[in-house]
């Protein structure tokens, strides 16, 4: 699931994730031929920095999406251009090979630089630029990514590659490639995709919110999967007919048909898990003069009703296709937050739960009074409870970003002091990326605060017009509740403002130091300003003052001057007065060094060891470090850290995708059914959200879970079953909202980390 989530903005993280995708992905065999006449060569100097080369695609890093990546990977298989390159903004526009990228050094002067002559030799078909649009390079026309590989091009369909080769050799199997693939469903999908793409372009040009664009991209993916599902089914039916009629002695032909049938069946299953849920008989009108569609084949598997959230999501997409409206996109975004288990705009999400999800879930339970439906209803009620009167969970993320930026800023200042300009430039680039992330979150908080203020103004008017004391009291309570929420939102942003002020004053102080006596007034003002903010951001203020203290002490003796004596004494006084907030038994840098030495590359053990250390030293000042480390770790691929499932009454849970990573199982997600399949060879498990039953294969046996499977973006599996079947346990990282998966080896290594931290802190 984590690969399906939004690709993070930080250059390093994106590169590492992108480069790593090639290692774990299981691409299907390519059947489409690559024609050099359909491609062009490019001038490497005319391509903007931060551009990736994947296959025959040029892709601006910030515009990379899952669908674009999937399409580019297919082009690499078809063209044979399997190496990946990157035009680095950190490496001053040089091109680097990044297939084996392991750190940011690999896109700087330490990386594998690729000569521009190599880039000039490559063939390219498409270019996705920084404006987010994809262009076909042969004619420079804008194209929809979902139409690049047409579902109706059966000769180029990768699932039919073996059969296409057989047709060339023996002339057999040609009937499959003449299959009639279009019907009223695919026609409706084609029109819907065209409309959604036009809306995407319109809104992007107008500078619409990125989340709205994400919703439109997701909608296009679901509509595209619906039409591909229809095509795959029709082609698979034709292949089955030929298999039944084939002469078993013709081994090559039978094998090609069997290969096609197997791959088509996989694609049917894959698209069924994500396609738009729509009733073709009631939701799609017949085409004027069109032929009636053939009746659907009966399903062999007993269909479980879709979750309420899946049905509502599909309905919102259908509504938008019929009549695009901004409020539909707002609802799609709100529903997406709820399904991902995050809270961005709690008021809107609570309203959506109360007005849409809970009534629909109650109606579904009344019609189908099963345990699963009851558990789903309870899930929505718990989501509502967690949002009523609460502040956005993203506020904690914002605080973490402020801390991250402060740390990067400190590292940059140190690099400048050491005259390491290359490192300073690298850190400056990362600071810029983090600053953009901060601005996005600050903008979101500002929008939410403005919305709450408007609600407050409306309630104040109603209170002034109220006739009874009871009405006035009720409205006054509601106003106070909004005031509290606005204050919480403002407090989080104010903390960031303090961090920025400290950074600005430290930068000013550093410049003033270089001016000698002429800069004393500015230097004094900066020291006093930073001192006043010690209680707001102690870590940043303390380290800044200590850095200035060292610099002034050094200048005092090197320049044989006493102009800094007064300020040196002032800093000593500030540090002494604020020792309660600035003092730490063990500093963050020391702790990180100890963790790395004791745990090596085992980040799970490092996080667990730090958590154990904090439990034994409750007064330690490393809680922010722990929270930052576990959150950062949870964003990595194949990490054993994950957000905790709320409202579980003491029962531990682990997400199916993380369990799959731990146990080296393949993870397959069915978004429509909210079902996760974990498979390894013939053994597999089917976990469905809100269900207490798991299907275990290959015998398709039903087993009971100790508690119903949970849901937070993916299925969460109860801890007792995780321990029994996969040999690991859930370890809660207190006060962070995160957990990790551990086994005995990890626990033993964590104990070593804890002991090392305790020894260092003595």
Image: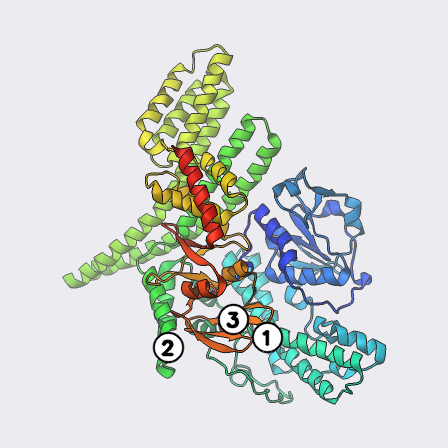
Q: Is residue 280 visible?
A: yes
Q: Is residue 534 visible?
A: no
| Circle 2 SS class | helix
Front-most of 328 and 145?
Answer: 145
Of discs 3 and 2, which sits in the foreground? 3
Q: Specify which label sits upstream in the sequence, 3 or 2.
A: 2
Question: In the rendered view, would you say 207 is above or below 761?
Answer: below
Front-most of 43 and 465?
Answer: 43
Q: Residue at x 54, y 72 (%)?
A: 321
> Marks 1 and 2, how far apart in space?
26 Å
Residue 377, percent from left and from top:
36, 72
Identify the image quadrant of the C terminus: top left
Front-most of 681 and 186?
Answer: 681
| Circle 3 SS class | strand
Residue 457, percent from left and from top:
29, 55
The residue most toward the left is 469
> Marks 1 and 3, how far apart in space?
16 Å
Please tell me the numbered disc located at residue 371: 2
Q: Specify which label sits upstream in the sequence, 1 or 3.
A: 1
Give the number of callouts: 3
> For mark 3, does the 10 Å Cα neighbourhood hold few (<14), some (14 to 19), or many (20 or more) residues?
many
In the rendered structure, are the residues bearing label 3 and label 2 in contact, judged by CB atoms less than 8 Å apart?
no
Q: Which residue is mark 3?
A: 685
Which quadrant of the structure image shows residue 372? bottom left
| Circle 1 SS class | helix
Residue 612, percent from left and from top:
39, 45
Q: Quick check: 434 left or right of 83?
A: left
Q: Quick check: 458 left or right of 446?
A: left
Q: Quick check: 27 left or right of 714?
A: right
Residue 116, percent from left and from top:
77, 44
Q: Which residue is mark 1?
A: 269
Q: Specify which label sits upstream in the sequence, 1 or 2.
A: 1
């Amino acid at each position: 699931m984590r690969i399906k989530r939004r690709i993070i903005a930080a250059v390093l993280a994106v590169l590492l994730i992108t480069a790593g995708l090639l290692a774990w992905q299981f691409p299907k065999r390519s059947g489409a031929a690559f024609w050099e006449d359909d491609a062009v060569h490019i001038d490497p100097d005319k391509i903007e920095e931060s551009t990736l080369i994947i296959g025959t695609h040029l892709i601006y890093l910030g515009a990379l999406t899952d669908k674009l990546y999937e399409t580019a990977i297919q082009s690499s298989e078809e063209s044979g251009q399997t190496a990946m390159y990157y035009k680095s903004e950190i490496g001053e526009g040089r091109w680097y090979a990044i297939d084996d990228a392991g750190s940011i050094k690999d896109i700087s002067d330490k990386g594998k630089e690729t000569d521009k002559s190599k880039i000039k030799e490559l063939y390219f078909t498409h270019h996705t630029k920084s404006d987010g649009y994809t262009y076909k390079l042969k004619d420079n026309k804008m194209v929809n990514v979902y139409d690049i590989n047409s579902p109706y091009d059966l000769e180029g369909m990768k699932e039919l590659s073996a059969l296409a080769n057989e047709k060339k050799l023996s002339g057999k199997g040609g009937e499959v490639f003449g299959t009639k693939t279009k019907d009223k469903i695919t026609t409706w999908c084609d029109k819907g995709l065209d409309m959604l793409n036009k809306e995407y372009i319109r809104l992007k040009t107008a500078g619409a919110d990125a989340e709205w664009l994400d919703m439109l991209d997701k909608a296009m993916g679901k509509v595209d999967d619906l039409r591909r599902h229809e095509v795959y089914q029709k082609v698979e039916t034709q292949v089955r007919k030929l298999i039944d009629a084939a002469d078993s002695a013709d081994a090559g032909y039978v094998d090609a048909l069997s290969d096609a049938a197997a791959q088509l069946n996989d694609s049917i299953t894959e698209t069924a898990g994500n396609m738009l849920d729509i009733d073709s008989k009631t939701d799609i009108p017949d085409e004027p003069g069109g032929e009636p569609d053939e009746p659907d084949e009966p399903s062999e598997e007993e269909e479980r009703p879709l979750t309420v959230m899946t049905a509502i999501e599909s309905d919102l997409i259908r509504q938008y296709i019929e009549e695009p409206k901004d409020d539909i996109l707002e609802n799609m975004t709100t529903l997406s937050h709820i399904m991902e288990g995050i809270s961005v705009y709690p008021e809107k999400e609570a309203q959506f739960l109360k007005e849409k999800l809970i009534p629909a879930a109650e109606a579904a339970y009344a019609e189908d009074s099963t345990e699963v439906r009851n558990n789903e209803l309870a899930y929505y009620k718990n989501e509502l409870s967690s949002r009523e009167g609460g502040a956005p969970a993203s506020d904690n993320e914002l605080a973490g970003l402020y801390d991250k930026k402060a740390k990067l800023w400190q590292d940059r200042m140190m690099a400048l002091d050491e005259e390491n300009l290359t490192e300073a430039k690298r850190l400056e680039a990362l600071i810029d990326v983090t600053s953009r992330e901060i601005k996005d979150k600050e903008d979101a908080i500002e929008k939410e605060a403005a919305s709450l203020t408007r609600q407050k103004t409306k309630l104040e008017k109603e209170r002034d017009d109220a006739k009874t004391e009871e009405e006035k009291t009720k409205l006054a309570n509601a106003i106070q509740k909004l005031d509290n929420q606005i204050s919480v939102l403002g407090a989080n942003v104010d903390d960031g403002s303090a961090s920025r002020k400290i950074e600005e004053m430290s930068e000013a102080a550093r410049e003033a130091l270089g001016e000698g006596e002429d800069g004393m007034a500015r230097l004094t003002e900066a020291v006093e300003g930073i001192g006043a903010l010690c209680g707001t951001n102690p870590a940043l203020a303390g380290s800044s003052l200590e850095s200035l203290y060292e610099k002034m002490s050094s200048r005092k003796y090197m320049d044989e001057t006493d102009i800094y004596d007064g300020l040196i004494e002032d800093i000593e006084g500030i540090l002494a007065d604020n020792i309660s907030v600035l003092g730490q038994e063990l500093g963050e840098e020391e702790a990180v060094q100890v963790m790395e030495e004791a745990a090596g590359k085992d980040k799970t053990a490092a996080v667990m060891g730090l958590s154990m250390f904090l439990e034994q030293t409750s007064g330690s000042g490393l809680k922010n470090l722990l929270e930052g480390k576990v959150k950062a770790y949870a964003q990595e691929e194949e990490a054993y850290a994950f957000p905790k499932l709320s409202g579980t009454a003491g029962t531990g849970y682990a997400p199916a995708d993380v369990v799959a990573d731990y146990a080296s199982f393949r993870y397959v997600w069915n978004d429509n059914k909210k079902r996760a399949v974990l498979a390894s060879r013939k053994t597999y498990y089917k976990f469905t959200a809100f269900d207490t039953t798991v299907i275990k294969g290959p015998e398709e046996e039903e087993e009971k879970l100790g508690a119903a499977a949970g849901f937070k973006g993916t299925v969460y599996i109860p801890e007792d079953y995780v321990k029994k079947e996969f040999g690991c346990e859930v370890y809660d990282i207190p006060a962070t909202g995160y957990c990790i998966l551990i086994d005995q080896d990890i626990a033993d290594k964590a104990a070593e980390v804890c002991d090392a931290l305790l020894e260092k802190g003595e």
